Amino acid sequence: MAMDLNAKAAYIRGLMTGMEFDPASKNGKVIAAMMDLLEEMAATVTEHDNALDQVYDELETLDQDLDDMVADLYGDDEEESDDEDAEDLYEVTCPNCGAVSTVDEETLLDQESELVCPNCGAAFDIELEGTEEEAPEETDNQDQ
């Protein structure tokens, strides 16, 4: 808005002063009272507008806080996608220093390369539980 209500009321008051308006005449008394009322109304509307802006800001903050609480309590889609990615990560303990680090499934199953501890730099191999060597024994037990 080019001019707010208070500025417009001040402009009209300036016009009245520039016209050498006589507030003592019968018509002048009515117009002066209307001008006073207009200025009071403009000030009140401005106060209410400022208060409403503050309420909107506080409401937006509460809405964001509520969204955060709902996300913490029930989770959201972003966390679900993170959980799906987390299923592909495995914890590996370094035999040299005992540090626990995480590796993805592809790195874990790659038999051609050794794992390197990010803590101490030691290279080591991983023995996976439930490897193919155990599979024939399980089938033999099932046949008996």
Image (cartoon, rainbow, N blue to C red):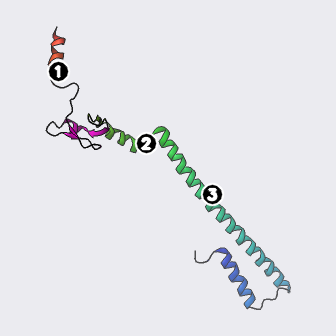
Work out how far the residue at label 3 is from the one at label 2, CA to CA, in angstroms. Answer: 28 Å
Q: Nearer the viewer, mark 3 or mark 1?
A: 1
Q: Mark 3 points at which residue?
A: 55
Quadrant location of the C terminus? top left
Among the 4 quarters of the image, the one containing residue 52: bottom right
* Residue named by callout 1: 135
Compared with 85, 29 (above or below) is below
Residue density around tag 3, few if under 14, some if 14–19, many if 20 or more, within 10 Å: few
Was residue 105 drawn as part of the magenta stretch in this picture?
Answer: yes
Tell me the residue at 16%/10% (across/down). Answer: 143
In-front residue for pair 50/105:
105
Residue 5, image x, y percentages: 66, 74
Give the residue displayed 86% in from the left and 84% down from the top: 26
Can you tell which quarter of the image residue 113 is in?
Answer: top left
The amino acid sitting under disc 1 is Ala
Query: Mark 3 or mark 2: which comes first in sequence?
Result: 3
Report the span colored magenta: 99-124
